[in-house]
Image: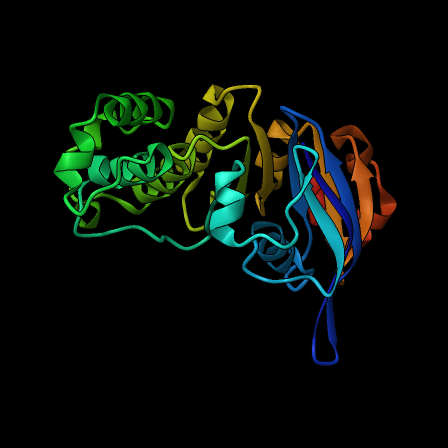
Amino acid sequence: MLELQGLDKSFGAVHVTRNVSMKLERGERRVILGPNGAGKTTLFNQIVGELTPDKGTIHLAGQDVTGLSVAGRARQGLSRSYQKNTLFDGLTVEENLGLAAAVHTGHATRLWSDSLAKPEVREIVAEVANQVNLMPYLHAKVSEVSYGVRRQLEVGVALATRPMVLLMDEPTSGVGPEMSKGFHDLLNNLPRDLTILIIEHDMDLAFDVADTITVLNYGEVVFDGLPEAARGSKLLKEIYLGSWEDA
């Protein structure tokens, strides 16, 4: 479903990703781990088209999308939720979801209410709101809801575009243990045919939700395999300076 082949990216003399290759099958849930500065977010930026790799290719559902823009890749079924909120604070939760759904369905207008009046848009909004537990907050402005709800909405906005592949950049960043558990439940409620690639710092969550784990260190893939094998890796324990023991 998503295949990366030899992605390289440098900024001046700093080599951020080095020959990164991986292949995700349909419905796979893969977690990318790595210490700060490992190149994880830079890799995501290349996958979605915000950065152009110096070398390498990106294929989505068998199609080479390396030369496509962010919007072009989104139209092909690639969506992303960000580590930092990128929402419209002055609109309601429903309007944020409706805007994403309207763009996907081709019903976007200058008036959010007009877009939400379309049955196809409202159907997507209702389905996504249920998936990410946002029904109680639909009519609240984004500026009025908690940080945790905003994080859920980020995922909902990405889902409203009906992606084949969803990239999630540290979805539990800045939330407490209870909200981390909520995200675990949220992920389990998502369709199993949705391919998901997650950058995550919470190892408990990572090992619990991942089908496969990829670890980056200094921009290189140093591990790629099953969570059980990752737990027993001496190299990964060294990279994380013992924190692996608590995972």
Q: How is the image coloured?
A: rainbow
The quarter of the picture where residue 139 lies is top left
The quarter of the picture where residue 158 lies is top left
Image location (x, y in percent) of residue 52: 63, 62
**In this rendering, position of residue 127 left or right of residue 208:** left
If the image is split into quadrants, where does the N terminus sit?
Answer: top right
Image location (x, y in percent) of residue 50: 54, 59
| Residue at 78% across, 29% down | 228
In the image shown, does 100 or 126 lie closer to the viewer?
Answer: 100
Is 62 placed above or below 191 here? below
Is 185 placed above or below 76 here? above
In the image shown, does 214 or 48 lie closer to the viewer?
Answer: 48
**In this rendering, position of residue 198 left or right of residue 64:** left
The quarter of the picture where residue 27 lies is top right
| Residue at 47% across, 43% down | 172
| Residue at 52% across, 36% down | 77
Instruction: Spot the residue most to the right.
Output: 234
**In this rendering, position of residue 137 left or right of residue 227:** left
